[in-house]
Structures are given as structure tokens and as C-alpha cells.
Amino acid sequence: MSENGRPPLFTHQRAAADFITARGGSGAEFHEIGLGKTRTAIEIFMRLRMTDPGLKMIVFAPLSLLNAAWKEDVKKFSNFSFCNLREVPWILEDDNRNFVLTDDIFAVNYEFLISIKKTNQLVKMISRSGPWLCILDESSRAKNHMAKTTKTIINLIYLFKYRIVMSGTPAPNSEIEYWPQIRFVAPELIESSTTAFRARYFHMTRGSQTQPVPGFMTRQQAHDVFRRGWNYAITAEKRRELMRAIAPACHWARKEDCLDLPDQIDEIREVDMGEEQSRLYKKMEKLSIIDVY
């Protein structure tokens, strides 16, 4: 245990915290699953809070992580107070009441941003206090630049003094998925539009055919191009060029390189199923599928 009673940071966590705070409090934490990205983000917030006492933090994350990961880790690794915005009645309402933000860290799921009313309430909340650190946890959720949630997040950049994206798999399908994530944390490193970004690093391919990426396309034109079998592709050289371009904002970590991690512990727990659970289990065993309401 460290002096404050909390477990000490692992080497890669300390390195990431040093890296992001050194570049002004914004950056990408691209660490493999299981490497404690949440703990690292809390550490960064602690450091920024020391020089920015009024700082608050808002986290956008998958619904399943709001309490199970963030609430628990905030409690375990800090003395900060935590608020799940989904559990606050006024954030769901369209009113002008004067609310007071008494917590340090707030969290909400990405789908919250689909609603214009809820987004407006969020903007109102953030604008009344600050400054703010914004975390995009599992930021590959914002990989599609055409998605409404991604567009909203990019449009809200101006609200946040500090910005961090976190993911173990930032671009699971294509390097094109780096654009919105890097655009969020380091817009100076990447093209201001996806059209320019694709034109610089990618080409079109269909079987053995290749051609440059077209300029701006309407949704219908893009649909027609892809319907004819064309896809975006990137050469190894262009991929290296892209990774060099975004490197100043990215801290990477792989499990195999984190030598001070503890050994994995496998724990087997035996659970007795009730009558209804046993019935459903046998049905699933037989049919490979069940409906659970």
C-alpha cells in the first residue's frame, strides 16, 4: 500500500499519467483490457486538480461501466465524490432550474447524447461550472464519425479544458476509426475533416483494382460506391505515416510489456441454481437459445 492507503500505480499507469499531464492534460490512453485504464484516468484527474482546484470530471462510458467500473474505482482509488447522471432526475427534465454541482466526478452513457433535450441539459450543467476534464471510456464507441453520438461529442469539444480517450481496441475495423478519437484530444495532429483524412492516408480498392479516394461524396454517392464493391484501404507505409502523426498524443501499453503486473488468479465459484434457473439452463443446453424477460 502507498502512503495514502491506496494501492500504488503500476509502471505503465504512472508512465501514462506522466505522459498525458506533460502534454497539458489531453491525450489518448490506448491500453489493453485489464491494465487499469480507469485508475490511470483518476490519477490524471488528481494531478490536474492540484493545479486547477475547481476542476470537475465527466465520463462518457458504456452503460455497464458507469457503476460497476467507475463508481467502484472512484471509491477505491480516491476521495472524490461520484455521480451517475442517469440517477439524477433533473438531468432528464427540460427546465431552467438552478442546480448546484456538489460532486467531483460525473458519468453517463453514450446513448444519453442521442436525445437533444438531455444533451442541452448536459451542456447547461457543464457551462455553469468548471473547468472540466472529459473522459471517453471505451472510446471506440465514438469511432464512427457519422454516428449522432460521435458528432455531438466532437461538437462539444469547446466545453472541456482537458480531454482523454481510453480504449484497448481503438480501431477494431479500420484505421479510419482513429479520426474522431484523435480529433477529440489533439485536433492539431489530424485533418479537420474525414474527407481530407481519408484522402491523405487511404485509397479505394476493389479486388485487384485501386484508385484514389474521391473528394466529398454525398451519402447516396458513397452508398453507390460501396454497393459496387469498393472499400477504403491503407498501405503499410501510409499506416506508419498515420501512426507517426498521432503518436504525440497517444500512450500505448500491452500486457506483455507490463512486467510488474501480478500473476493472473483464476477463481472457481460453485453456485446452486434455483428451479427456474435450472429449467432455463436445460432449455438453453438443448436449443442453444432462450428468451429471458
Image (cartoon, rainbow, N blue to C red):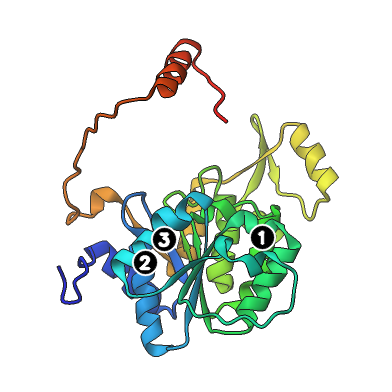
x, y (%) of residue 35? 31, 54
Residue placed under numbered mark 2 in the picture? 74
Of the image marks 1 and 3, the number of the one nearer the N terminus? 3
Residue placed under numbered mark 1 in the picture? 113
> Which class describes the residues within 10 Å of circle 3: few (<14), some (14-19), or many (20+)?
many
Q: Residue at x 69, y 61 (%)?
A: 151
x, y (%) of residue 176? 59, 51
Q: Nearer the viewer, residue 21 or 50?
A: 50
Cβ–Cβ under 8 Å for marks 1 and 3: no
Is residue 160 at least partly visible in the picture? yes
Which residue ends up furthest to the front in the rendered image? 275
Q: Residue at x 66, y 57 (%)?
A: 149
Quadrant where the image shows the C terminus: top right
Q: Nearer the viewer, residue 134 or 123?
A: 123
Q: Residue at x 41, y 53 (%)?
A: 68
Cβ–Cβ under 8 Å for marks 2 and 3: yes
Q: Please tell me how many numbered marks the rendered image carries.
A: 3
Toward which corner of the image does residue 119 lie, by quadrant? bottom right
